[in-house]
Each structure stands twice: as structure tokens, then as C-alpha cells.
Image (cartoon, rainbow, N blue to C red):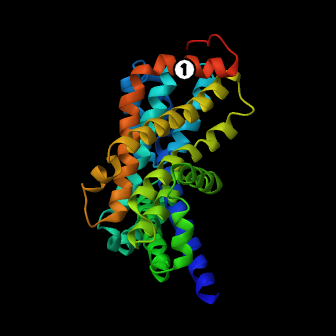
Amino acid sequence: MRIFLETLVRLGAGVGIFLYGLHLISACLEDLAGPAVERGLQKLTASPWIGALTGMVVTALVQSSTAVTVMTVNLVDKGMMTLEQAVGVILGANVGTASTGVMAALPIRSLAPFFLIVGALLVMAGEAVKKRRRSGRGCGKAVGALSMGLGMLLLGMELMQDAMVPYRSSRVLRGLMEGLGHPVTGVLGGAVFTAIIQSSSASVAILQSMAAEGVVGLQQCAYIVYGQNIGTCLTALWASVRLSPAARSSARLHLLINLLGTVVFLAVDSVIPLTRWVGSWTPGNPALQVANLHLFFNLASTLLLLPFSGELSKISLYISGKKCYCKP
């Protein structure tokens, strides 16, 4: 019981530090370029492909697909973006958020203390400069906050993985995870857990930690990853509740896209060894294999669904009981 409580505390601390690191990165970049990002999303979405590229780049920088998706929903609500344009941004955001898992799985986690120390020094130096000048944001402070955010992200990932070490040979946990080895239970498990913690990045990071310690197999991870992409849609759906019908349609569009991607991948994975093929890219590195699965799922879904952006927006409108939407 004591070991279980210690593990729970370490895992919770790792998730908390990881999430706060993401928050620091996101908040700092949004503060520096929030209005510019919104204008960029509005201007660079005339073509679905350019919109997808824009959503991918912005999400990779801001480190939050939820923030970009909610921003997109708000632009649709204001009539500054159409549902068809929103398809590209949402698909691109899904790809961009997968960069977090890849970065966390790379062998740079030992640099977490370095990023934290440098970040703290830059923040303190920036505060001192700001007090002397009594104006300005301070570029050093912003860079320091970004450095601390990256350090916390890597440190959180390290704590989560360390928390799983005592359970390498746990029959109870392995039995529980084996229950998620079926496509339906795996998808549902990933969706529910991600919806609860409100972060697909943190959910994937926990899964990476479990895979790194051999608690869960790669095929199980694939089903859970598909579900994680569905669970992350809850925030945008919740944010759109009090907005216009068009905004609610764009939030449903996010869910529709991830549901379709999951159905296609489950079908393909049942016919060909897709998961094993992706895993062969980085043998011996389970955490990076999970990150690659997440990235490949979102990238392939984007390439597959983007040509049908018009049809997807019509389906979303049909579900909402609407026949048209206002163009910006």
C-alpha cells in the first residue's frame, strides 16, 4: 500500500510538472504573439492545405492543440473563418501537438536541470532589468520562461517514467492494461482518461512512461493513442456550448475528424501490421515508438481527410441541423 501511494504521488507530481511546463510555454508564446497568432490563423486559411500547415506550426510553437482549436472555434463564432477553413487548422493542430511526445521521448531529458537553471536566471535577470527601466516585457524574461517550461516538461516526463519502475513486473497492472488490448476497450480507455485530465500531451506522456517500463505493449498503445485523440475534443466542445451554432459545429467537426481517423486506422490495422511497421522505425525505444504512433496517426489522418474538408463541414452542419454557414 505504501509503495502504491508513493507511486501515485510521484506520478501525480510528474503530471503536474509536465502540465505546468506546457502551460508556461503556451502562456508565454500566447502573451508575446496571441493577437498575431489569431490574425495569422484568419489570413492563412484560404486554402485547407495552407490552413493545415498554419495550424501545425502554431500548435508546435504554442504546445497546445486545445488552445489552437478553441481559438479556431472562436474565430468561427465571430464569422472570421468558415467551417471548411477550420477543418485544415484543426487537422494541422492535431499534427502539431504530436511534436511534444517526440521531443519528450528524445534522449535530452537529462538536460532538464540545465533548462531550469538557465530559465530561472534569465527570469530573475529580466525582472531586475524591468524594475530598473520600469517598462517593457523583457525579452530575457520571456526566453527564461520558455526555458523553464521546457525543463519542467522534461522533468515531468522523467518523474512519470520513474514512478512506473516498481510496476515493471506487477501482475495486477499488467492484467489491467491487458484489458485495454482490445480495440474497443483501448480506445474507450484512452478517450476517458484524456477527457479527465484535459491534455492529450500529458496522457500520451503517461502512456510513453508505461511503455518505456514494459507495462504496456505497442499494439495496446496504438488503441489507446487513437482514443486519446478523441478524448482531447472535450475541451473545445465544452468551450463552444454558449457560442453560436457555427462555433458548436466547428467543435463537433473536431470530434468528427478524430472519430473518422480512428475508424480508418482500426480498419487498416486489422488488415496489415501497421503498428508493428511504425514501431520498427525506432526499435528499442518504446517511448519514441508511442510518440511516432501519435505523430503518424495525426499526419496520415490529415493527408487522408484534408481533401474532403468541404464534405466534412457539410456533415458537421447536417448533424447540427443547419444547411449553410456565413462566410467571412
Return the residue nearer the eye: 132 or 178. 178
- Where residue 98 sits: x, y (%)? 41, 48
The answer to whether residue 231 is left or right of residue 133 is right
Crowd class of label 1 (few under 14; some 14 to 19; many from 20; radius 10 Å):
many
Residue 275 locus on image (x, y percent)? 35, 51
Determine the residue positioned at 27% across, 67% down. 284
Q: Residue furthest bottom?
A: 2
Q: Nearer the viewer, residue 272 or 197?
A: 272
Q: Is residue 273 above or below residue 49?
A: below
Quadrant where the N terminus sits is: bottom right
Residue 255 falls in which quadrant of the image? Answer: top right
Residue located at (39% from left, 38% from top) = 56
Relative vertical location of residue 325 with respect to residue 160 in this rendering, above or below: above
Q: Residue at x 50, y 33 (%)?
A: 260
Confirm whether residue 189 shows in the render. yes
Callout 1 amino acid: Ser
| Foreground of the two, 235 or 300 | 300
The secondary element bearing badge 1 is classed as: helix
Please state, as top left, top right, bottom left or bottom right, where the C terminus lies in the image.
top right
Residue indicated by mark 1: 313
Residue 126 visible to an observer of this rendering:
no
